[in-house]
Amino acid sequence: QKEVEQDPGPLSVPEGAIVSLNCTYSNSAFQYFMWYRQYSRKGPELLMYTYSSGNKEDGRFTAQVDKSSKYISLFIRDSQPSDSATYLCAMSAWGAGSYQLTFGKGTKLSVIP
Amino acid sequence: GAVVSQHPSWVICKSGTSVKIECRSLDFQATTMFWYRQFPKQSLMLMATSNEGSKATYEQGVEKDKFLINHASLTLSTLTVTSAHPEDSSFYICSARATGREFYEQYFGPGTRLTVT
């Protein structure tokens, strides 16, 4: 079992839809959970981070972490064509000077006008 | 702000030769830079972490003598793939953490696609 599992998609939704992106993980030591967005031929950019369990909202984006289920989600409300990109989840246990991020494979999202 | 560049964006080299990839933080100082590798349909895998002025820390399974990393200044890190082979063909991405920022606040470069023939 891989440490982080993420459905690669592709996922196509109509403009205005609510998008749900998810990752599961196996390492219970993970404490930091991040979502990155990657446009074609660009490097990933940090969208949101969450520490431990709970929800975090930023505009149209909501990140949820359920450590008991080892499951994280990213919701995008009122999706726009400009949201079309690959979304990667990443996690870290951090500590002892380790900065290692463990990434999912990414989910390719297309928002159709 | 927080722009990271990589050069070249795409390189083709012959088996047995060496290739150098540069990673620059353009508008901030980066104490720490990270090098990742991504094979098709696979996730980003951390290869090594480099801190300015010190030796890089390599992840398990990454040959330090094959992938030479030099973080000579607060804005430049280089990755040299020595004696490249076709199995080294991949997408190499660097990221940089600004001095004083959290570890997860990494700014990524656009990546370098290496093809070894």
Image (tube, coloured by chain):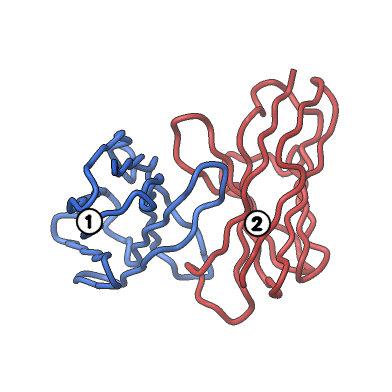
Chain colours: A blue, B red
Label 2 Cα crowd, 10 Å radius (few <14 / some 14-19 / many 20+): some
Question: Where residue B58 appears, x then y in whole percent?
Answer: 63, 51
Number of numbered tags placed on the structure image = 2
Q: Nearer the viewer, residue B102 or A112?
A: A112
Is B81 positioned to the left or the right of B93 in the image?
A: right
In the image, residue B69 sits, relative to residue B92, either above or below, namely below
Label 1 Cα crowd, 10 Å radius (few <14 / some 14-19 / many 20+): some
Question: Where residue B80 appears, x then y in whole percent?
Answer: 79, 43
In the image, residue B103 sits, relative to residue B35, either above or below, namely below
For mark 1, name the chain.
A
The circle drawn on residue B57 is: 2
* Amino acid type, callout 2: Thr
Question: Where residue B108 appears, x then y in whole percent?
Answer: 58, 57
Determine whether the residue tagged by mark 2 lies in a helix, strand or loop. strand
Determine whether the residue tagged by mark 1 lies in a helix, strand or loop. strand
Question: Where residue B22 appears, x then y in whole percent?
Answer: 77, 51
Q: Nearer the viewer, residue A25 or B110?
A: B110
Residue at screen point 64% across, 64% down: B3
Residue that extends furthest to the left in the rendered view of this protein: A68
- On the same chain: label 2 and label 1? no
